[in-house]
Image (spheres, grey):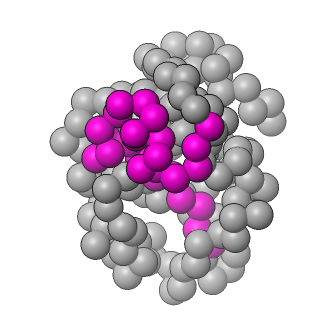
Amino acid sequence: MDMDLESYLKNEKIWHKFIEKAETIRTADAAAASGVPLEKLTKTLVLLDEANQPILAIIPGDCKLSFGKLRKATGAKSLRLSPFSEAESYSGYPPGGTPMLHHKNKMKVVVSSKLSAFDTIYGGGGSRRLILELKTEDVVRLNNAVVADITE
């Protein structure tokens, strides 16, 4: 699959806005570098279930993932974070740049219900130098995502 995120967004006529920033990996650093509020800047986490199937969890930058709640939302028996070195092989993007949609592999996606409070949310823009703003409803719809309480 061609991982050209911008072409995909334009071809699908998805409203979006890219913000350039200094290269960062940590969400808090990205928020500081871009001026985006941390609760609207998402962490897009690649996890693996007991069968090594990837699951994507999208949570607010100021929250921690609850593995127990995510297991309940996905029906997984066990979950672990994908090793940093392997995350790109599942999503197609480097950690710190993983966008909220358009991934290399089809994955189950769960979006934190806390993000439903916002019309638009921000996430990785395909590289560590870009942040992507999308409509929350588009992130849910295009991923066929489950919306659930998955934070501590």
In the picture, measured across the screen, residue 62 lies left or right of residue 5, that is left
The N terminus appears in which quarter of the rendering?
Answer: top right
Specify the quadrant of the image occupied by residue 149.
Answer: bottom left
Left or right: residue 2 versus residue 41 is right
Q: Nearer the viewer, residue 122 or 144?
A: 122
Side of 151 where 30 appears, left or right: right
Task: Report if residue 138 is visible in the image.
Answer: no
Q: Is residue 28 magenta?
A: yes
Name the foreground residue: 106 vs 111: 111
Q: Is residue 102 magenta?
A: no
User: Residue 83: percent from the left, percent from the top?
Assistant: 70, 70
Residue at the spot 31% in from the left edge and 56% down from the top edge: 62
Q: Is residue 19 above or below residue 99?
A: above
61 sits to left or right of 39: right
Q: Residue furthest left?
A: 117
* Image point (78%, 55%), residue name: 89
Across the whole image, how many numbered discs are drawn on residues?
0
**At 31% across and 67% down in the image, what residue appears?**
151
Q: Residue 51: percent from the left, percent from the top?
A: 68, 79
Q: Which quarter shows the C terminus?
A: bottom left
Q: Is residue 92 above or below residue 86?
A: above
Question: Picture coordinates of residue 82 (x, y %)?
Answer: 65, 69
Q: Which residues are magenta?
A: 23-48
User: Foreground residue, 84 or 134?
Assistant: 84
Q: Residue at x 70, y 59 (%)?
A: 87
Residue 12 placement: quadrant: top right
Position of residue 102 measured from the top left corner of the image (x, y, whole percent):
62, 37
Q: Is residue 34 visible?
A: yes
